[in-house]
Amino acid sequence: MSFAASVLTLYPEMFPGALGLSLAGRALEAGTWSLEAIQIRDFATDRHRTVDDTPAGGGAGMVMRADVLAKAIDHASPPGDERPRLLMSPRGKPLTQARVRELAAGPGVVILCGRFEGVDQRVIDARGLEEVSVGDFILSGGEPAALVLLDAVVRLLPGVMGNAVSGEEESFENGLLEHPHYTRPQEFEGRPIPDVLISGNHKKIAEWRRAEAEELTRERRPDLLGAPPQPLVK
Ligand code: SAH
């Protein structure tokens, strides 16, 4: 059974985009996953195919209409569709490797990409959309965020990654950032590969990698080790 992604967007041309190449592209061709990009504008009801309107209460920008979005969502995800419905949103829960794994284990996803100031709250509530963020910054639309999420999910689908082990040793999989990597040449601009890595002692190598991973995590992401979040630097 293949993983089915449906993306609701004003820019279907952005898909599969980068996901048509490399690992994800080959998996798409092989049918390991499928991707359907649906034009939200096709569900507008007026002559001008309007999908947005001015914000209630005033203010800058435009808001995507609940009625048009609901029709698009109901088309992509009819009753009985078990796939989670996501809304890419900077207000959402930050995406984690754990959530990516859960999604990859499921039947697929329906992803709504916002544009303008965002979407009418009532369609989020009425269709039970799960808001997902890809980081504390603002994109101009949900499409790049959807591509990021799908990239992370697709590489975990069975058969997509050549070496299945590499998926489990990665950053975040064990709550740590990954240790540094080295490859030939043995010396680069006067910098040798650390001795332990060419010692052939696999126990020592594993210990060294673990220690490096812990050190790096303490330095860069103490929050992963349970430390309180760092104060925001202005
Ligand atoms: N006015 C909104 C930002 C709108 S950006 C706010 O201040 O919260 C337009 C669209 O881009 C959003 O609706 C969302 O779909 C997408 N987007 C922007 N930043 C994002 C992020 N960090 N993660 C996921 N989606 C994002």
Image: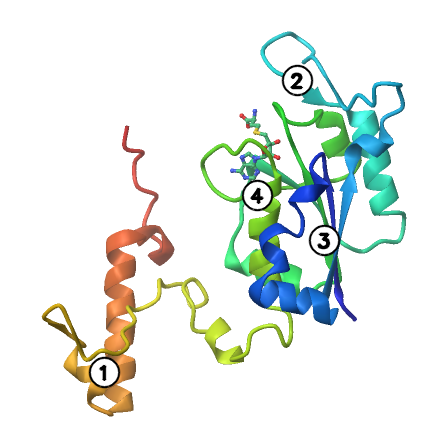
Is residue 100 at least partly visible in the picture?
no
Q: Amino acid at mark 3?
A: Val
| Number of numbered tags placed on the structure image | 4
Q: CA distance from mark 4 to mark 3?
A: 16 Å
Q: Quadrant of ligand 1?
A: top right
The amino acid marked with disc number 1 is: Leu
Mark toward the start of the polypeptide (4 vs 1): 4
Q: Residue at x 35, y 66 (%)?
A: 178
Closer to viewer: mark 3 or mark 2: 2
Q: Earlier in the sequence, mark 4 or mark 3?
A: 3
Name the spot of residue 11 as percent of width and height, x first.
69, 37
**Residue holding disc 4:** 144
- Callout in the foreground (4, 2): 4
Mark 4 vs mark 1, foreground winner is 4
Q: Earlier in the sequence, mark 3 or mark 2?
A: 2
Label 3 element class: strand
Is 50 on the left-hand or right-hand side of 115? right
Tell me the residue that label 1 is attached to.
197
Asked if labels 2 and 4 touch by Cβ distance under 8 angstroms, the answer is no
Disc 1 from disc 2: Cα separation: 56 Å
Label number found at residue 62: 2
Give, as a three-letter code, the residue at label 4. Pro
- Depth check, mark 4 against mark 3: the one in front is 4
Q: Quadrant of the C terminus?
A: top left
Depth check: give the residue in front, 199 or 11.
11
Residue 197 falls in image quadrant: bottom left
Q: Is residue 183 left or right of residue 10?
A: left
Quadrant placement of the N terminus: bottom right
Cα distance in 3D space between marks 4 and 2: 20 Å
- For the point 63% across and 77% down, the residue is 159
